[in-house]
Image (cartoon, rainbow, N blue to C red):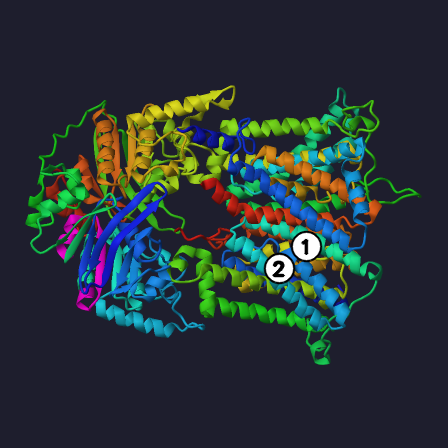
Amino acid sequence: MALLEISGLSKRFGSLLALDNISLNVAEKEVHCLLGENGAGKSTLCNLVFGVYRPDSGSLALGGKPFSPKSPADALRQGIAMVHQHFSLVPTMTVIENLMLGRARPVLEYSDMIARVKALDREYGFVVDPHSIIEEMSVGERQRVEIIKCLLGDPKLLVLDEPTAVLKPEEIEALLSICRRLTEKGKSVVLVTHKLAEIAKVADRTTVLRHGRLVETVTMAGADMRALVRSMVGRDVTSADAVLAATIGIGDTGEPEVAAAVQREAPAQKTILSGNGIPALELKRLTFRGRDGVCKLEEVSLAVNRGEIVGVAGVEGNGQNELETICAGLAAPTSGSVKVNGRDLTHATPQEITEWGVGIVPEDRHAVAIIPELSVAENLLLGRLDRFLRFGLLNRAAMSEAAAALMRKFDVRCESPDLPMSSLSGGNQQKAVLARELSLDRLTFLLAAQPTRGLDVGAVEAIYGYIRAARDEGLGVLLISSELDELIAVSDRVVVLYRGRIVGEMAANQGNREPIGAMMSGHASGHMHV
Amino acid sequence: MSRSHALRLASKEFGLTGKRGHVFPALSLQIGVPVAATAVALLIGLAIIASTGTPLEDAIAAFWDGMAGSAFNVGASINRAVSLTLVGLGFIFANRANLTNVGGEGQLAVGGMFATAMALHGAAALPLGLAFLVPLIVGAAAGAVWGGIAGVLKAGRGTNEVISTLLLTFVALPLVYWSVQSLHLLRKPLTDLSSLPESPEIPEATRLPLLFPSNQTSPLHIGLLVAIAALIIVAVVLQRGSFGLKLRAVGFNQIAARRAGIRSGSLIIIAMAVSGGLGGLAGAIMILGEQFYLTSEFSSGYGFDGLVVGLLSRGSAVGVVLGALLFGFLRSGSIDMEITAHVPAAVVLICQGLIVIIIAGSAIFVERMRRR
Amino acid sequence: MTEAQLAFFLGSGLRLATPIIFAGTGEMLSERAGVLNLSLDGMMLIAAFTAALTSWATGSPAIGLLVAIAVSLAVAYVQAVLSVTLQANQLVVGIGFNILALGATTFLYREIFGPLSRDTIPGFAQLNFPWLAAIPVIGPALTQQTALAYVGLLLVAVTWLTLNFTSFGLSVRAVGEDPRAADEAGINVIKVRYLAVLYAGALAGLGGAFMSVGDSNTFTEGMTRGAGYLAITAVIFGGWDPWRTLAACLLFGFATALQFLIPAMNLDIPVSLLLMLPYVLALLAIAGVAGRSRQPAALTLPFERAS
């Protein structure tokens, strides 16, 4: 008998049909992977199982009995636990306080909980200090706390939503082995991912979702990887460019069937335009010390030439944020200089930066790049409102026209430029941000941080397409991403950022993937021009 | 874009009023709820009055008389509405940038105080109408400074402007008290006949000219014109000006606005200063147009009422005017009701509080209807 | 300054601080849970009036106190319905309640007490023990206090214990920082916020009742004089921490007491400046002169689980 039985589940959000008649089951002691690109409906399905949403139609059964959770608490009580992409930990409280939330007796007794945590530590190999504060912990550590939190209730089923997206390469290995150990202890795991290579290592069965529909459920033993790729992406893929391969997680993982499933095209000839010799961006000994005295960037020097894409590899939190905010004019470095096209912009304001031809696609799209409540046109043209003034008042019609033209050029799909930005999908929002930045006058240099996070394959390809096209026209691009494979596929050369320092620089090809990965974790340093 | 969609956007642009002739369920709800709330509150008020034993007809008669019983009273009610409108406009102006200015009472108070000071010390000699214009401007400037302080605190230190403007009010009111207490400041000289803590009357030249000077029964003064001008300017700037859009951007997301090149800090300070300035203008008008001398309690809650009007208008300038008229007429009626029918004016306070609470509580239903 | 003046100053400072301590402590808990009660002043006023009325009618200040708390709880409940369930703008609700409270208490006062406004009402007696008076420096000040003052201090301790050592306190803190995370941990965010608002209401009721039956033994229109706003300010000044809020309340109480001390010492400082002193102090505090503190992240933000 299956542990969890899902029958005919559907869910609609407004006009979007997120899930359409999904039926699958999860067996006991199994690692069941949910595979699909971003936007396929995987998270929605998990949230339905966990009681965050209620289905529009269909039913669930747990251990044979009907199961319709009205809230996460309900689901927890019945033995289902979930680790979301966005952790539900209160940042200002400690680990132990977070664990006690909703579980403690009226008067708090920490010792009991600490003992249980230590027992779990021994069983599964976690290493977590119960008294550290969440906001001071790394993402990987926080995820472990989330898993511990789930295990406290001794669940029968553990749902992990895209857990590897935020982890370092070695942490991913650790997580996958935890999944296996969980099944050894009698539990089932549903692992949501869009990376094919991961499921190859750990899944018993895989269900593929695409655009809210279930494509197939496959037993991994003896599975045809090529068919899986086809199910996931929706088209026959006999050869894929490096970007696509990277996006669906086929790197040099050492798994021959996986690599063989998709033959990679030979990388396109990468030419570097010489321009007039002045680099698009020149950072000289850039140092940034935060308010707490910690040095986030140390003597960073690098140059991005015109007609070149330089990728910045590194695990999040090693100085990328600071690099981005300094280049955007939102923070001043403690020492060092930033020159764009020869002009010193070290202490420039965001307005000046834009005027001098710097485009920024920030990492946190929702928080800083767009204002969701304003319309698409307003977002696109916010920095250039003075061009649309007529007698001191805004010429809305002209704004709509200009916005619509921009949207057509960059394939931003939306009914009208006057609709709020929030009505666009993630991919279209990012395209809009790129459209805005790439259409700046005198654009010399573009900084794009994590530009494809959370986007489906189509959007990823489009975004990199536009960036490459701009590069071909002479733009200098600094690409910051923790998706190593994508970075290698798109960049001309790669620098590695570790603890605020540039620890290495290499040509961007797959042969260098391992040394780059090693540098990202701080195990090596070196400069190789191959 | 479909036609109904376009119309919906247009109605959002203009606040309460939609294009002529088109009425949507959501729109009628926006007008209907305040009307219903007022009706309910007034009914409850009547019930309370009835419970005191006062005959309802007397109370209602006195109330109506105070509101609109004579041309003079209508004029006085409109004058009250003028002050409330200005404070309310100030509120929605700052609110456009997601700033909540609850310090209208204090800004009004310092505005009146400085206008009086200007009127008593030198403005009377100014030619060409400057005699009353200068005190008006000085009053507005004082209010702008008062609001600007909160703006500076917010922009520089992230201080919550709700608390800071509220605190500034409780600093402003004793200031006014002090100014009329102290002979060194604005207090009128002690005589055998009177030693009240209030200022001398302002000279004739500094008083706001009447709109209908030949008509003895109308107290309407040019303050009405000032309010109408302010209404148009504020509405246009907020809806159609690039400044209004920048305010919205800053209000939604300061960081994203900065990245777009908008100087968020300056904008916040300007928004709070304009907001305070409108409040100060209201206070100046009250002194220069009606009261003609400063007392410590002259603000008498107009700032708070104006702020309530602003809150309830949900960002619409037209809504401010309607709310100001409502509260202005209510206040006139309540005064007469207390004097003539001996029904405590506090009953109207009860009604006002109920109106506010009912409208606030129903906001969620209005929102849900609008979303459909 | 004479010894008698000092004693009087300390004593009146404590007396003036007491209602703020009550209201501030309760409000602190509510704000830790994310709900701002701008209507604190109104709740205190209603409680003051109810206590005065009941005490006068029954002759017992204790019954007056209890009825006042009950009424405050009812008012707080309505406030919670509006702020938490109906997700109304917490500022609007607060100001609306204050207007309503002022109107209702003024009206009822005139109708009921009108001709009797000179009457004093039965109030709590001051605890005037000889051994208390013998304590050096603060002894005479302490003898001016009623039992309620000590109840106030006790409540601060109780609130601190609750917040840090009970499961409810943990839930309150979580709900105020990250209600979504609390919700996913299985905590009933709505219920926690309701309880927090009721707690603030009960304590505001105690504070208001103190003003009429514990301190002045009378009721005057609008007698809270903004004490509720001062309490909210004290919470911010105290960085949403129970003991620092207590310190802030005491500071404001003593600042207000200066109003009486300065003229008694024949210093020619205008009363107005003393009237505004607590608020100026509070302004300086929130302007960051005393260092910044972090407000609960979810303060004034309503919570709705997406469905």
Q: Amino acid at mark 1?
A: Ala
Residue interval drawn in magenta? A181-203
Residue at the far bottom in the pictured view: C131
Question: Reading the chain from its start, which is encountered first: label 1 or label 2?
Answer: 2
Subunit bearing disc 2: C
Q: Nearer the viewer, residue C227 or A222?
A: A222
Disc 1 target residue? C101
In the rendered image, residue A197 lying in the magenta stretch gets the answer yes
Does B24 sit above or below residue B105?
above
Does A151 sit above or below residue A282?
below
Disc 2 target residue? C75
Residue at image location 77% in from the left, 40% down from the top: B64
Residue B209 appears left or right of A424? right
Check the picture and name the quadrant holding the N terminus of chain B. Answer: top left
Q: Position of residue C203 (x, y in %)?
A: 61, 65
Residue at image location 69% in from the left, 44% down from the top: B172
Check the picture and name the quadrant holding the C terminus of chain B. Answer: top left
Count of numbered labels shown in the rendering? 2
Q: Position of residue A430 (x, y in %)?
A: 31, 36
For the residues bearing labels 1 and 2, Cβ distance under 8 angstroms: yes
Q: Position of residue A236 (x, y in %)?
A: 12, 38
Residue at image location 58% in from the left, 62% down from the top: C200
